[in-house]
Amino acid sequence: MAQWWALIVAIEDGAESGFGTMPYALAGAENLTKTLEQAGIDNAHQIQILGTRATKNIIASRLRKLRKLVRRGDSILVYWCGRGFSDSESATLLCWDSLADDLPDTAFPLADLVGQLFRCRCASVTLLLEISPIPEMLSLARVPDVLNAAELHNLTQIHDRLAILTAAAGAETPHAAARWKSPIWTHLLCVAFRGPQTGRTGSEPLTVPALQEFIVREIPRCLRQHLEPGAVQTPQLYTSAGSEPILPTLPPRTAGESPGLLDQDQLRRVVFRSETTSRVKDLSGWKKTFDAPTAATASARKFIARLAMTEIKADLDALVSQVREELGTRRKDLAITVTEGMGSLRTPDFEYSLTATLNPEQPAQVIWLREVGGLSNPAFVRGPEWERVFRQPFDQFVFEFVAPIDVPALVDRWEDQLPAHVQLQVDVDATACVVRLDGVSGAITVRRSELIISGRGGSAVGLLELFLAFLQRVGPLEEPRAIPVAPTRRSPAH
């Protein structure tokens, strides 16, 4: 059976500092490595040469190893992120140990790389090049293009099973996004390999032209979102006529399988929530001359809301600092609102709010309700940035329905088709039901207006994974089919 092999080379800086750096090259390559593993190219079929290991000798050695591993009919995917230059005829890729005064022996000509790859007797080679030009002050390049377009075209004519995609054209410098901690083009590669964002449906494969079309469509939006106005980057594709290599992607979902990622409309209705309490007397605005509330009256609630403003502003200030540092979000992309007893922050990635209210059952306490919703990407919840931005744990996952549902009808349907290892508890009046999955901690409560998950040790990613496990065992949440809306009880969303 034909298999995929991957060669991943990423060089962020070099032994000689004069060549400059390639921001987030290593982080982007590591993300691509994980994505390709999810798409079916396991670690045993990936050769990773990163950072200081990316010397010319090591790269040549790994190419020789690749020739021994690849069998006739296999395909090779090569990703190279680093610096390079062109002369009048050929492009050259710098290695970690490249020397300015000895480039012929310490750098890697692109033509040599392609030639060695096709000695592997493979069915096809797809070359992904995120190459940035070396600084002009070195005067090593005789032509302005970092990759020689004529040479790339000729290589695809010589090798009719070769496709080359480049992150930029001519002398353009590929851009990186601090928020993603990745080169933008590399990030889009990962997005395409992960799923249907390229516009494919069902089991339709991802071809090289389809990948290029997706990236060309998306990169202007990414540049506008992450860079100053005027940034330009023009990805290029070189391939022989009629050659459309099929690229690895995550396997298509089958009926009843969890989609893994919510669609954008559903994702916007996901809210992570936490609730904590503190003493009224611990508020920074509290004075000894004040009388502690004895009941949650309207005047007492308003009084506490005013006193809590200092804590709310401090919380938002700290969060803004974390967002700017960890996600690289620009000031103009942040929207802050502060009113009595409540503060909110809207960013391109999420919406956050903090509300302070008087505890009606214990008026000597303040209830602090934190919520994060309006998510743009579930990968943000799974990534390390989430834990660095939100220091406090979240103990509830809330999925809001677009309209109230008929809980009794839902319970009746589930009781007829629930799989093994799923337990269902129903209130006497059937206004709510609780679902538990054997072997999984945490409870899922379904009410007319929302689905609430609690538990999982206060971990946001744990709450999300429990929701996906629920979808996988009980069925996909495809409103209104999976959770039917009662036709006679329809009302505005809660």
Image: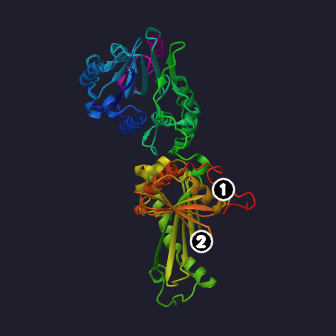
Specify start and end residues of the magenta stretch as a single range.
Answer: 135-156
> For residue 460: magenta?
no
Q: Residue furthest top?
A: 158
| Residue 37: image tag | none
Circle 1: residue type: Val
Residue placed most toward the observer, 317 or 194: 194
Q: Is residue 239 left or right of residue 201?
A: left
Does the rendering let one see residue 481?
yes
Residue placed most toward the observer, 253 or 155: 253
Q: Quadrant of the N terminus?
A: top left
Q: Position of residue 11 (x, y in %)?
A: 33, 32
The residue where tag 1 is placed is 402
Picture quadrant where residue 256 is located: top right
Q: Residue furthest front?
A: 416
Q: Position of residue 138 (x, y in %)?
A: 35, 25
Circle 2: residue type: Val
Q: Is residue 79 above or below residue 480?
A: above
| Residue 428: image tag | 2
Mark 2, secondary structure of its residue? loop
Q: Please name the colour scheme applied to the rendered image.
A: rainbow
